[in-house]
Image (cartoon, grey):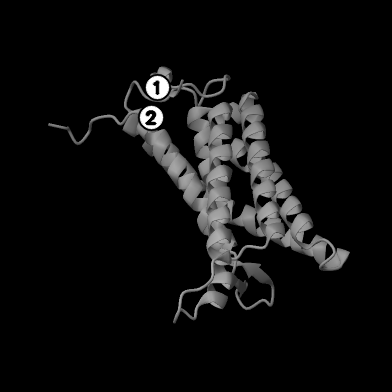
Amino acid sequence: MVKVNQAISPTTIYTWLVGLSVATLLISNLASTKLFDLFGTGLVMDGGAVIFPISYVLGDVIVELYGKRRAQRIIVMTVMMNLLAAVVFLIVQAMPPGAGWENQAAFEAILGFAPRIVLASFAAYLLGQFLNAHVFTAIRRTEFGGRNLWWRALGSSLAGNLIDSLVFTVIAFIGVINPTQLVALVLLAFVVKMLGETLLLPITYLVVSWLRRLTGPTGLIGGDSLEPGLAIGDRDFN
């Protein structure tokens, strides 16, 4: 009989984090097909901004518990799975609609990602998340950063979110909007993402603490070490 307080293996938690990472980017890409007015300010944002800050919270949690190398594996897997989804949607979109099915235009509007937007999304996510993981690990090696999760989380996100916002906006909109609008869009996206992650910082603390409790006394040990995170039972990942 399984006890309620039985520790959960690092492998199980890692699997859930992979699934959440893939789902977050996929949902963000789908939600981004809708534009909305930001609190009546006249500033237009895409729907992906609602959930996208969670991807950086996940990224910080993964680096904190499992280290940079495994975080980078998850980043690559996330991009590959979302690329698969984009290819499937493209193939389905190209298939002739069945008799009586009148939703082809709606399907194309929601799931018919423009290749340029797909490239912008994946390039921004890949570069931003890789930089986030690298900076997070570098900050953790410092005396102050090693003692303070908030500093390594926000410091790494400053770099990751800036590159993410810059790469996505430039690839997606250069030549479409004027340079002034381009810079304004980059800054707006960056500020909104940083604001979202700052507000979610207490959640980052709670999730890290909760996952460490779940793994029990023989759980993850890499989060506070100077080396990229290693877990007891590391053989499970090799």
Going 57% across and 39% down the picture, which residue do you hit? 75
Name the kind of residue labelled 1 in the image. Asp
Give the x, y percent position of residue 60.
55, 39
In the depicted view, which residue is nearer to us: 168 or 180? 168
Residue, disc 2 = 11
- Against 2, residue 118 (above or below) is below
> Does 4 sit left or right of 142 as displayed?
left
Residue 74 location, x and y as percent? 53, 37
User: What secondary structure is found at the residue carrying circle 1?
Assistant: helix
Asked if marks 1 and 2 touch (Cβ < 8 Å), the reply is: yes
Residue at x-position 57% and y-position 55%: 86
Q: Nearer the viewer, residue 200 or 63?
A: 63
Disc 1 designates what residue? 236
- Tell me the kind of residue under disc 2: Thr
In this orientation, which residue lies closer to the viewer: 129 or 78?
A: 78
Q: Position of residue 165 (x, y in %)?
A: 71, 53
Task: Identify the image quadrant of the N terminus.
Answer: top left
- N-terminal label among 1 and 2: 2
Within the image, what quadrant is residue 190 found in? bottom right
Indicate left or right for 173 with 3 as reference: right
